[in-house]
Image: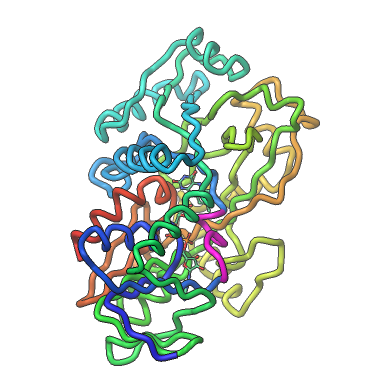
């Protein structure tokens, strides 16, 4: 294949698709999206919790804080316009007595980001979620909602193809770069004027092939889910979350009633052995050893990572997961929980110079190429607002 385009996007996840949409708005005509899989949503964008977050947790000034509230609004508007599934279920964040102060800290963060939230008392909490741990106070987020991520991807794809300005090249992997303007793929070369790296868990590698972002390395974390058995799914009406440890980017074990009414518990955030290692051992590669080495170094150098790795790894065990989940839902019993095949991988970026987990999205511009790294949760929620920013920056 010899192909040329104005803008080449690597990665057909929500980041790549929403950026393509914005490029068209800006008048760009000839866009190619290369996707190494044969369909959309094979990775994070099709394997997430499907929650439109409301923008409560994020440090002021970060991309997450800037784009979550607006992204939530835009994605809801899109779902309504296209008649896609949208359930505006809301969310409560509960805290035991020792963490009641943390609710007020979260409320402050939410206010700073313009996210709507209210401190509610026990009676109000139990009216919303009758089986939640009856904490004295809780935080209520009315704008949290659930959507069907794959349905949204399919809809945006249809919209993009309808413009005839975007071409999807499936089964096409970016392998490297030649003369700054030619991408080498397994299907031949593609000449481009502008390049956008939205390659999710491989975004660090794609950036490195441009000589960009060498201090950043992905460390994958596996998110597995359990589910409430159907007869007990009445225990959760919407979303019940704990107060997270804000030192790490994970939200702790929580309950989410999805669009198909199943109530999921999770996801975990367990160090994974591969960037796409969804089973136990079926994606072990030569990289597994270097990923283990990265885990090992961080265990000794990063206290937050050590705490998360220890507590998260325990969640492989149903008994520990139950203990965590019971803090939110005291009535829960072992027989109420069943396994599910649902699993995703979070490609968490580490700044290898400081040995710190990167908390925000990273945008690196180098000439005519732009690299989006660490598009982790809530990147699905933020995507439509973030894409506007990315295109403006370009
Ligand atoms: C378990 C879990 C739960 C989550 N829950 C939520 C949630 O509830 N709400 C929320 O807002 N966010 C959530 N997220 C985060 C969200 O899903 C991601 O941040 C978002 O989907 C990232 O989108 P992306 O397009 O950047 O990456 P991806 O969806 O991973 O897309 C990148 C694409 O690039 C392709 N690719 C990679 N390398 C190459 C290459 N060399 N050549 C060609 N193609 C390539 C991949 O095949 C992939 O399809 C969750 C994530 C996980 C893992």
Q: For this view, does 187 lie left or right of residue 119?
A: right
Q: Classify 157 as above or below 187.
A: above
Q: Measuring 42% from the left and 61% from the top, which residue is drawn there?
A: 349
Vertical order, 384 against 144 (above or below): below
Q: Quadrant of residue 288?
A: bottom right
User: Does the rendering let one see residue 79?
Assistant: yes
Whether residue 225 sits left or right of residue 303 in the image: it is right
Left or right: where 23 falls relative to 325: left
Taking the magenta stretch, the answer to whether it contains residue 126 is no
Q: Position of residue 295 (x, y in %)?
A: 54, 63
Residue 114: image x %, image y %? Answer: 26, 32
Magenta span has 41?
yes
Q: Is residue 72 above or below residue 149?
A: above
Q: Residue, x 27% and y 77% (percent of image)?
A: 6
Q: Which portion, as a residue range, is magenta?
A: 38-46
Q: Position of residue 228 (x, y in %)?
A: 71, 33
Question: What residue sits 44% from the left and 71% below the top?
Answer: 168
Q: In front: 211, or 169?
A: 169
Q: Looking at the image, can residue 354 be seen? A: no
Quadrant containing the C terminus in the rendered view: bottom left
Q: Nearer the viewer, residue 248 or 91?
A: 91
Q: Residue at x 63, y 65 (%)?
A: 277
Q: Quadrant of residue 73?
A: top left
Residue 146 position in % (x across, y down): 50, 37
What's the magenta bit mostly, secondary-structure-wise?
A: loop
């Amino acid at each position: 294949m010899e192909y040329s385009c104005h803008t080449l996007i690597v990665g057909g996840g929500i980041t790549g698709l929403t950026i393509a949409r914005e490029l068209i708005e800006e008048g760009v005509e000839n866009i190619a999206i290369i996707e190494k899989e044969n369909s959309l949503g094979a990775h994070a964008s099709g394997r997430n919790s499907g929650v439109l977050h409301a923008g409560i947790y994020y440090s002021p000034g970060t991309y997450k804080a800037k784009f979550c509230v607006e992204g939530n609004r835009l994605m809801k508007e899109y779902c309504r316009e296209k008649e896609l599934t949208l359930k505006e279920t809301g969310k409560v964040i509960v805290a035991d007595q020792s963490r009641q102060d943390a609710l007020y800290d979260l409320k402050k963060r939410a206010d700073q980001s313009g996210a709507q939230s209210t401190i509610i008392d026990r009676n109000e909490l139990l009216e919303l979620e009758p089986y939640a741990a009856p904490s004295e106070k809780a935080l209520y987020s009315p704008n949290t909602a659930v959507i069907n991520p794959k349905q949204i991807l399919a809809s945006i794809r249809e919209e993009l193809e309808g413009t005839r300005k975007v071409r999807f090249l499936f089964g096409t992997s970016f392998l490297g770069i030649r003369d700054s303007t030619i991408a080498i793929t397994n299907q031949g070369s593609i000449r481009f004027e502008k390049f956008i790296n939205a390659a999710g868990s491989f975004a660090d590698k794609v950036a490195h092939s441009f000589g960009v972002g060498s201090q950043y390395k992905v460390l994958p974390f596996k998110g597995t889910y359990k589910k409430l058995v159907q007869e007990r799914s009445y225990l959760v009406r919407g979303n019940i979350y704990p107060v997270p440890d804000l030192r790490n980017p994970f939200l702790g074990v929580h309950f989410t009633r999805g669009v198909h009414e199943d109530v999921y518990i999770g996801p975990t955030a367990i160090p994974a052995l591969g960037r796409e290692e969804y089973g136990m051992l079926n994606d072990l590669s030569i990289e597994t050893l270097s990923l283990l080495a990265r885990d090992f170094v961080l265990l000794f150098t990063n206290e937050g990572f050590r705490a998360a790795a220890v507590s998260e790894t325990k969640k492989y065990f149903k008994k520990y997961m139950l203990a965590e989940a019971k803090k939110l839902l005291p009535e829960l019993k072992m027989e109420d929980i069943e396994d599910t095949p649902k699993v995703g991988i979070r490609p968490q970026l580490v700044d290898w110079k400081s040995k710190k987990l990167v908390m925000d999205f990273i945008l690196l511009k180098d000439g005519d190429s732009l690299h989006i790294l660490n598009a982790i949760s809530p990147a699905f929620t933020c995507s439509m607002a973030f894409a506007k920013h990315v295109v403006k920056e370009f």
